Image (cartoon, helix red, strand yellow):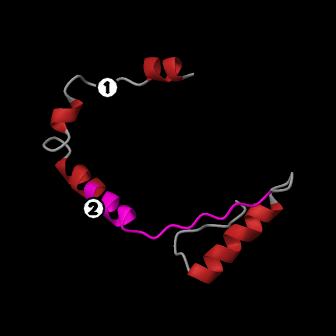
Amino acid sequence: MLERAAELVVMPGDWWADRTTTASEIYDLYRAAKGRIGAMECRVVSFEDDIKGVRSTVAEVYAHAHLRTPYDDFSTS
């Protein structure tokens, strides 16, 4: 699968050097986001999910309500 993905993704040979010049705005946003994410506190809770994913959905909704996360979307459409 990895080999197939490598065939489909075309990377220019100088993309690494160009990341700070050609796409400097995107690179700056990426670095800022990476810094914010690196500073975040992280907790992992393991639980056994059921076949329909009900427990994971309940856990996500609880975390959203308790932590007041602004970007969770539980819409059905």
Q: Amino acid at mark 1?
A: Met
Q: Nearer the viewer, mark 1 or mark 2?
A: 2
- In the visual, does 24 lie left or right of 56? left
- Kindly identify which numbered label has been placed on residue 43: none
Q: Please provide percent x and percent y for residue 62.
A: 69, 76
Q: Which residue is mark 2?
A: 32
Query: Residue drawn at (61%, 67%), measured in percent from left and top?
Result: 73
Say which amino acid is labelled 2.
Answer: Ala
> Is 47 left or right of 15, judged from the image as shown?
right
Which image quarter is the C terminus in? bottom right
Residue at 13%, 43% in the rendered image: 21
- Whether 27 is drawn above or below 13: the answer is below
Q: Between disc 1 and disc 2, whose residue precedes?
A: 1
- Residue lying furthest right: 51
Q: Are marks 1 and 2 in contact (CB under 8 Å)?
A: no
Q: Is residue 76 magenta?
A: no
Q: Which residues are magenta?
A: 31-48
Residue 6 at x, y percent in the picture: 44, 21
- Report the residue at 26% width, 51% height from top: 26
**Left or right, 71 with reference to 20:** right
Front residue of this view, candidates 49 and 13 = 49
Position in image of residue 8 (x %, y %): 46, 21
Q: What residue does disc 1 label?
A: 11
Q: Secondary structure at mark 1?
A: loop
Q: Is residue 33 magenta?
A: yes
